């Protein structure tokens, strides 16, 4: 396994060095059939909480004993919260829990959602009878959630897999919000297995529209109106990017200690925001969550995070997502133009200085992405995002002086 992580060492979490070093290649074979042979191992996702836990997702090329090769997803976890029901290996006081996708111990419905025969049965129960289905894994965060797209000749449905304890709340959100704004309708759910089947919405994501050069897009007032449509009483209190800035900076300082001083300065700068009254918020409002058709909003997705929070946080996450997306996009000019237009509209509704500081905090959160998904040259990509957050802090200072 090739990795840029050999320098990582956490005395409180010795499993980190194991899962990010050469030993990981040998470990993952324990989750496979004994007669299968590992050909190569790539770390494709890592969730690390310094001093507490690490969850690593590997893509493993396997030579099958029956002939041929295949790609498998193997997950390994160590530290707090590692599932006790998974296969556990112990050596020198280090415990590593292992599982093979889709047999996630925290997501009991995932195996069914990833099995075409089981999904055909599920679709039949929902009144969408099919004899053939094609499944596409759209997202998988080990132990947390997965999204499987089910495509038949007659229908397209998204099966969201979450922890069973969260199903009732998610079902309630979709039911209540669907009465007020264009969110996917729930077609059915299983609380025991942690499954919710959701309507496929029309349109393309705002992100895809921007990257394809579209210029006829929802403007600032339309996005503000969309947020205003979120009903009260949906969900609990939602933390904003400033609330999470110290944790994000702590992770980044642990994996890129050369940026520690800059990260500490960013956390101090963004902490100067003023409080706002709580209102209904989406909680993760960005360009991949909005569907667009004919230049207008056609849908709002991933409402799991909806609840009560500060309006500027939703606006800041949108601006931060656009600014971060722009860094490596061929459509940078179009994205920047759109972001500037939105910011001018948002400035009419919230404090411009605080909006920019919150945006800096949201960019800091997005700066953890290159490490999490093990992007090539992730250290350099992280530094670019840290520098972008610093630019937003500078912009906040200019906005304050212009008042």
Image (spheres, helix red, strand yellow):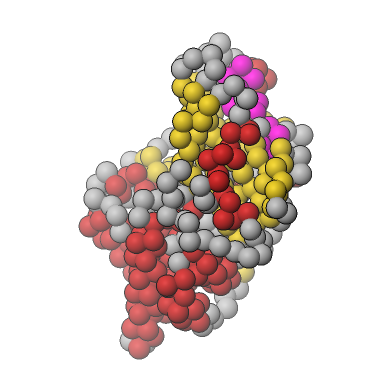
What is the quadrant of the C terminus in the image? bottom left
Residue sitting at 35 percent across and 88 percent down? 401
Horizontal relation, residue 353 to residue 16: left or right = left
Horizontal relation, residue 337 to residue 71: left or right = left
Residue 372 x/y as whole percent: 49, 53
- Between 293 and 393, the residue placed more toward the observer is 393
Against 135, residue 7 (above or below) is below
Considering every residue shown, the one lying at the far top of the view is 131
Residue 123 x/y as whole percent: 61, 21
Residue sitting at 54 percent across and 14 percent down? 66
Horizontal relation, residue 6 to residue 77: left or right = left
- Between 6 and 398, the residue placed more toward the observer is 6
State the image quarter where residue 129 is shown: top right
- Between 46 and 241, the residue placed more toward the observer is 46
Horizontal relation, residue 223 to residue 107: left or right = left
Residue sitting at 75 percent across and 36 percent down? 191
Residue sitting at 60 percent across and 73 percent down? 277
Q: Is residue 113 magenta?
A: yes
Q: Is residue 164 magenta?
A: no
- Between 120 and 234, the residue placed more toward the observer is 120
User: Which residues are drawn in magenta?
Assistant: 104-120
């Amino acid at each position: 396994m090739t990795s840029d992580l050999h320098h990582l060492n956490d005395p409180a979490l010795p499993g980190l060095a194991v899962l990010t070093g050469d030993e990981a290649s040998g470990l993952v074979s324990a989750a496979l059939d004994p007669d299968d042979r590992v050909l190569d191992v790539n770390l494709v996702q890592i969730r690390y909480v310094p001093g507490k836990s690490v969850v690593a997702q590997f893509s493993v090329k396997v030579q099958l004993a029956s002939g041929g090769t295949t790609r498998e997803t193997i997950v390994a976890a160590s530290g707090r919260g590692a599932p006790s029901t998974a296969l556990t290996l112990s050596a020198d006081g280090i415990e590593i829990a292992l599982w093979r996708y889709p047999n996630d111990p925290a997501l009991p419905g995932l195996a069914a959602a990833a099995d075409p025969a089981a999904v055909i049965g599920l679709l039949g129960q929902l009144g969408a009878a099919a004899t053939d289905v094609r499944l596409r894994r759209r997202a998988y965060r080990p132990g947390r959630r997965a999204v499987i797209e089910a495509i038949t000749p007659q229908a397209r449905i998204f099966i969201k897999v979450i922890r069973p304890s969260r199903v009732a709340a998610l079902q309630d959100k979709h039911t209540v919000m669907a009465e007020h704004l264009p969110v996917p309708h729930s077609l059915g759910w299983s609380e025991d297995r942690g499954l919710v089947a959701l309507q496929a919405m029309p349109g393309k994501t705002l992100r895809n529209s921007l990257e394809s050069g579209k210029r006829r897009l929802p403007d600032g007032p339309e996005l503000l109106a969309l947020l205003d449509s979120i009903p009260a009483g949906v969900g609990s209190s939602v933390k904003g990017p400033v609330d999470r800035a110290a944790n994000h900076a702590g992770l980044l300082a642990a994996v890129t200690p050369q940026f520690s001083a800059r990260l500490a300065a960013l956390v101090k700068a963004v902490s100067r925001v003023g409080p706002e009254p709580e209102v209904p918020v989406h909680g993760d409002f960005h360009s991949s969550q909005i569907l667009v058709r004919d230049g207008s909003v056609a849908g709002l997705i991933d409402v799991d995070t909806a609840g009560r929070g500060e309006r500027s946080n939703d606006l800041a996450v949108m601006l931060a997502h656009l600014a971060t997306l722009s860094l490596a996009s061929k459509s940078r000019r179009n994205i920047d133009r759109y972001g500037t237009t939105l910011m001018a509209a948002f400035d009419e509704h919230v404090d411009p200085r605080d909006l920019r500081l919150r945006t800096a905090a949201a960019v800091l959160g997005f700066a953890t992405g290159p490490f999490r998904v093990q992007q090539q040259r992730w250290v350099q990509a992280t530094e670019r995002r840290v520098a972008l957050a610093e630019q937003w802090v500078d912009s906040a200072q200019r906005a304050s002086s212009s008042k």
